[in-house]
Amino acid sequence: MNNNAIYSTLSQKFLTHFGASHKYAAYAPGRVEVLGNHVDYNEGLVLSAAINFGTFFIASPRQDKTCRLVAGDIGEEVSFQIDNLLPQETATWSNYIIGVLDRLTKDTEPTHGFNAMFLGNIPLGAGLSSSAALEVCAGKALSAMYNITISNIELAKIAQAAEHRFAGVKCGLLDQISSIYGKENSLVMSDFRDLSIRNLPLGKDACFLMCNTNAAHALVDGAYNERREKCEEAAKFFADTLDHPVTALRDVSSSELNSHADKMEPTTLKRAAHVIGEIERVTKGHDLLLQSNLKEFGQLMFESHQSSMDNFENSCPELDIIVSVARKIPGILGARLSGGGFGGSAVILLHPRDVEHATQAIATDYEKQVGHPCDISVIKPSSGAHTII
Ligand code: GLA
């Protein structure tokens, strides 16, 4: 379903379910991570884009303090009181919204609850940040409804806090910032140290394919948090070792890493090598984009994936197959895993004229090697989150 169709289906479902139309609505897109893997929580630089798939959240205030939340796709409803916001043990999708609400209303005492429903077209578990999109569109609609003024950066932080506290993933700010700051035909260049964010035009000669491996991997959240801890350990090692201040791996260069490699615990060394290499690749990638040098930019994407395989160990056989298949297809400029890893999707950079033959070639080869198909979509860098009414 395209975005207009989703919004009208959702509006109709809301009307049928609650017996009256919604008064507030917001949209937030998913994101693709183009270069800069597991760099956000190391205060580094990342290139990403908001995508043309997203989620709508619509709501109306109620007279009483009850909040009724409905997941529009499955029709499941959760209800709670606005002055008693607690994580839910079942219908855990609701925690992304309850978590946002908890932070959003922490300095106010809302006098009323609401009816709300959401619906989107971001494939779940595909590494396209459907949860960040849900948090952000809920945050936009609910802050409008409660008349709470917050900046976009505050909203990103509130949404991140919802993931940390209510979903247990110690994620960085990448997903939320990309969803909020996306711009059509542009990448989002984020500096996670000072939180400065810029849009870089991508030009007409480039587009992306997302290849969802459909690979379900257990322990993803635990593995994510464990990677983060290793990065913090590495930063601490360099803070104690180097003679300049180190607060995060952002402060360490690859030559510093190489000169102290022999003193580091091998796994911590590999994790740090990935992050430091990624930050350097994003810096190079940014300059290459300004020169419209997509060919060399694509090579950095391949290098990024190789580092995920060798150093960060956050890839999986299915992602590796997509990337190695992509390397051999004429016209494909670059490919890598996108997002947390351990499954999910690979992102492929190519010229729009190569989309058709590349899609066919990847689909055929992937199915032959893996035994089940992958889902391939064309991704267009798109505008970020916004309120509708
Ligand atoms: C997930 C997290 C982000 C980021 C990426 C990896 O998407 O939510 O904060 O760390 O993984 O770059």
Image (tube, rainbow, N blue to C red):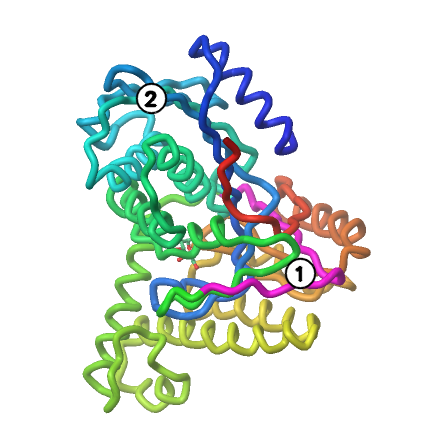
Amino acid type assigned to the residue bearing label 2 in the image: Phe
The magenta stretch is 197-215
Query: In screen coordinates, is 24 left or right of 166?
Result: right
In the image, 100 versus 153, the foreground residue is 153
Mark 1 vs mark 2: give the one in front: 2
Q: Tell whether position 211 is magenta.
A: yes
Q: Residues within 10 Å of mark 1 (few under 14, many from 20)?
A: many
Q: Residue at x 49, y 49 (%)?
A: 179
**Residue 290 percent coordinates (x, y):** 64, 74
Query: In screen coordinates, is 25 left or right of 257?
Result: right
**Residue 76 percent coordinates (x, y):** 40, 19
**Residue 67 percent coordinates (x, y):** 30, 21
| One can see residue 318 in this view | no
Amino acid type assigned to the residue bearing label 1 in the image: Leu
Query: Pointers 1 and 2 in contact (CB under 8 A)?
Result: no
Specify the quarter for ligand 1: bottom left
In the image, 321 versus 128, the foreground residue is 128
- Mark carried by residue 303: none
Residue that carries the numbered disc 2 in the rendered image: 114
Q: Residue at x 37, y 54 (%)?
A: 153
Mark 2 C-beta to ligand 1 under 8 Å: no
- Mark carried by residue 349: 1
Q: Tell whether position 183 is magenta.
A: no
